[in-house]
Amino acid sequence: MDFRPLSIEGAWEITPRQFPDSRGMFAEGFRADKLAEHIGHRMQVVQTNISVSTAGAVRGIHYASVPPSQAKYVTALSGVFIDFIIDIRVGSPTFGQWDSVRLDTVDRRAVYLSEGLGHALACIEDGTAMYLCSETYNPVAEKGITPIDPTVALALPPGFRPILSEKDTAAPTLEQAREAGLLPDYDEVLAYRRSL
């Protein structure tokens, strides 16, 4: 597995080695020990989520309150997605910036995003994504920012027409969430991660 740190601190792109033969292909999809070498602790997977999306679907920008928040390891089981990691940590040097990774069944990449980061998934071709999560879903702690916030300006492909849930459509902008005190603090996030 190849781990590449993204431009947002606390996020990595993971590319597995693939072993094709006459039967098909084999690859390791997740290695807790290898991931721990990069994040400094072992990710405990306590919930897996599977989302089936039609082209145009956008899920996010989602995040959860820290602590405990929710680290995620995301990969595509079918179709094509753009995975966006958004720095929503107030006080971070890259606050308001994002990075992205194409997830598909060609390279079979995955994305890891640590606690306190925002996450959005845009479906380019009908498909299924799987999330490994470090915490169970907590509706009280779950928060969101609209993925069509023009100040965040996620780079969706030309002609892409986003299909959003009512919840994501009604979510605040990044600045509204900041003014309301809903965003995680960068130093508090780092301190929490060091405690893991």
Image: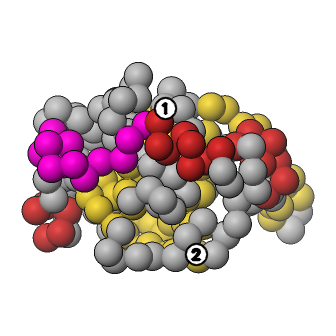
> Element at badge 2?
strand
Give the magenta-colored segment's residue range: 174-186
Q: Amino acid at mark 2?
A: Thr
Q: Assign the N terminus to one quadrant of the image.
A: top right
Was residue 176 drawn as part of the magenta stretch in this picture? yes
Relative image position of residue 118 (x, y in whole percent): 38, 49
Disc 2 from disc 1: Cα separation: 24 Å
Relative image position of residue 143 (x, y in whole percent): 29, 62
Q: Is residue 176 visible?
A: yes
- Left or right? Give the position of 152 relative to 53: left
Query: How many tags in the picture?
Result: 2
Q: Which mark is residue 48?
A: 2
- Left or right? Give the position of 108 relative to 122: right
Q: Is residue 16 visible?
A: no
Q: Amino acid at mark 1?
A: Ile
Q: Which residue lies at the image location 66% right of the left edge and 32% below the top edge?
A: 4
Q: Which residue lies at the image location 82% right of the left edge and 48% below the top edge?
A: 34
Circle 2 packing at 10 Å, graded few (<14), some (14-19), many (20+), is: some
For disc 1, the marked residue is 8
Was residue 88 drawn as part of the magenta stretch in this picture? no
Relative image position of residue 12 (x, y in whole percent): 61, 39
Model colouring: secondary structure
> Element at badge 1?
loop
